[in-house]
Image (spheres, rainbow, N blue to C red):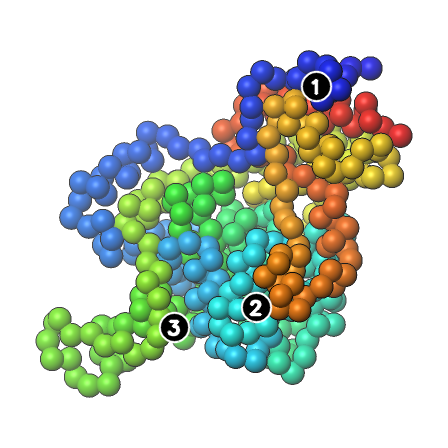
Amino acid sequence: MEKPAIAGGKPVRETKIFYGHQSLDEADYQAVLDVLKSDYLTCGPKIAELEQKLCRITGAKYAVAISNGTAALHVACMAAGIGEGDEVITTPITFAASANCALYCGAKPVFADINEKTYNIDPESVRAHITDRTKAVVAVDYTGQSTQLDELLEICHENGLTLITDGAHSIGTKYKGKPTGSIADMTTFSFHPVKTVTAGEGGAIMTNDPQLYEKLVLYRAHGITRNPALMSKEPDGPWYYEQVDLGYNYRMTDIQAGLLISQLDKLEAFRARRKEIVNRYDQAFSRLPQIVVQEEIPESDTTRHLYILRINPEKLTINRREFFDALGAENICCNVHYIPVYYFPYYQKLGYEKGLCPKAEKLYDEIISLPLYSAMSDQDVEDVIAAVEKIATYYAK
């Protein structure tokens, strides 16, 4: 039996491969250069061009480009009217921003448990956590797989709640043939470098509701408007504007927008390559009893942002940390997504305790994020598989 590198064997590769990486080409570089040579670095025409392109891709009526995915969630909560004393239901298996956005508005995050097979928020757990203070649900498309949108929309409509989909992972994903971004009341995107397409940083909010759209635009830019219909008096001249609400400086730059417009031209190619890699991983790991493969709902045609390796502790003599370290010794650099949000000291100080979501907590103890990005070569993929197989086999019970 071949020894893993951590046990004295030879690593599967000499150079490191990282869990995520941007994929840029000459068209992307030129797109940024063109903006830098233009008259507008921010508040210029690239913003509207990007928003129109996002609407074409997703099928949503409106898009609001914004500085990052966290800002997108914050502004979406503001547009939903979330405030002091309200509750917002979300999942603990997510980046902290999915819950922090409620705190920004003075509301309380409430954590619902996950489906133990798909790892997405469980609609029945959402239903069980609704109170007379619940105002919205922030459902995360974890790893890129769509949540069970039909069930969540039904729950939200029955209870007068706003459904916000945190689609930070899921641009390119479709639910029952409809693209992410066109279904929930609002959908937020993130364009961080490890996502499927990137603006460096950046985000967007999609909606079909004109009233929500009007609020999103307002809150993105200080609560300031030049729209006479929203002003308290007739404009004194073309320079005139009014602050009609308290908003934030959450604007995206034209530099970011130019890069993202170019990246979106490659979305289908990125999507296809990610699906190829995921299919190869699934094929390999489904043969290993030491590994549990994430399941997908049939409604979701997923563009995967993360590939989650879940170990089966009953079939291994090592734990998740030891498996993680063994992969690192093979030069496979991984990550873990995510620490349950309410584990963090800040949330503990707010009174949250471990034990709230048993399925999510068990998942956290068993998961590792493997490398997944469109620029991975076939050899990169095979090296990751070889490392996992070597470790799983060597430490099998």
Q: Which residue is mark 3?
A: 215
Q: Is 61 or 360 nearer to us in this picture? A: 360
Q: Amino acid at mark 3?
A: Lys
Q: Amino acid at mark 1?
A: Ala
Q: Is 388 or 170 nearer to us in this picture? A: 388
| Crowd band around label 1 with a 10 angstrom C-alpha radius: few (<14), some (14–19), many (20+) | some
Describe the element under mark 3 as helix, strand or loop: helix
The structure residue drawn at horizontal position 29% and vertical position 51%, both measured from the top left corner, is 253
Quadrant of the frame with the C terminus: top right
| Crowd band around label 3 with a 10 angstrom C-alpha radius: few (<14), some (14–19), many (20+) | some
Q: CA distance from mark 3 to mark 1?
A: 55 Å
- Contact between marks 1 and 2 (CB within 8 A): the answer is no
Describe the element under mark 2 as helix, strand or loop: strand
Residue 80 location in percent, x, y? 49, 74
Q: Which residue is mark 1?
A: 5
| Crowd band around label 2 with a 10 angstrom C-alpha radius: few (<14), some (14–19), many (20+) | many
- Contact between marks 3 and 1 (CB within 8 A): the answer is no
Q: Which residue is mark 2?
A: 163
Q: CA distance from mark 1 to mark 2?
A: 47 Å
In the rendering, which numbered label is found on residue 238?
A: none
Q: Is 69 or 296 nearer to us in this picture? A: 69
Answer whether residue 301 is visible to the viewer in this image: no
Instruction: Locate residue 170 relative to residue 284 in the image: left or right.
Output: left
* Number of marks: 3
Residue 21 in the image: above or below residue 183: above
> Which picture quadrant has residue 36?
top left
Residue 203 location in percent, x, y? 42, 53
Residue 173 location in percent, x, y? 55, 48
